[in-house]
Image (cartoon, helix red, strand yellow):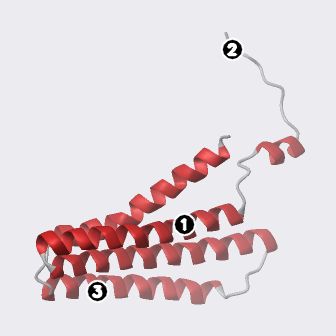
Amino acid sequence: MIHHQEPTTSDDAANTSTGLTDADLRGAMLGSLRLLAGLAMIVTALFSWKRGWQSGALVLIGAGISGASLWEWLRLITLFNESMDHGKTRRPMGLTLVGFFLRVGLTIAVLYVSLKYLDGSAFALAIGLGLGIVSLTIQALRLLNRWTR
């Protein structure tokens, strides 16, 4: 059986839309960064103990790159939200985008140098990079849980 739902007015749609605020998204991103730092310390200690300090350093490098990426995405989200909410931003969009692409280039250089000169496990670097995804996923699930209540 198909149920017909009455169309909602624009006021109803605004009240029943996602309900997520810019502060919620910012809090989730900052929580991801804190969680990433904690996970990185634990995983670094494990890799250093089992595979040597070089692998531990690679975990930290990967986690550092992930943390820098999360921070950069937080800046971009904030910039785009300001632009959408107020029609203008406090910072020039071009300058922020140049910084973003410079960070991407720096990331590639750091990855190359760390793999070339540290005789550690590339798997440790991949784990460090993946910690950012894990922490962001956990925070997204927490936000989703709060939102669905």
**Residue 80 image point, x, y percent:** 66, 72
Task: Write down the residue under mark 1.
Answer: 31
Callout 3 environment at 10 Å: few (<14), some (14 to 19), or many (20+)? some
Upstream in the sequence, badge 1 or badge 3? 1
**Residue 72 image point, x, y percent:** 51, 78
Looking at the picture, which amino acid does disc 3 mark? Val
Looking at the picture, which amino acid does disc 1 mark? Gly
Residue mark closest to the camera, 1 vs 2? 1
Name the quadrant of the N terminus. top right
The residue at the point 47 percent across, 55 percent down is: 138
Name the quadrant of the C terminus. top right
Q: Is residue 9 left or right of residue 127?
A: right
Upstream in the sequence, badge 1 or badge 2? 2
**Residue 75 image point, x, y percent:** 59, 78
Looking at the picture, which amino acid does disc 2 mark? Ile
Label 1 SS: helix
Q: Kindly check if marks 1 and 3 are in contact, taking CB atoms under 8 A apart as contact.
A: no
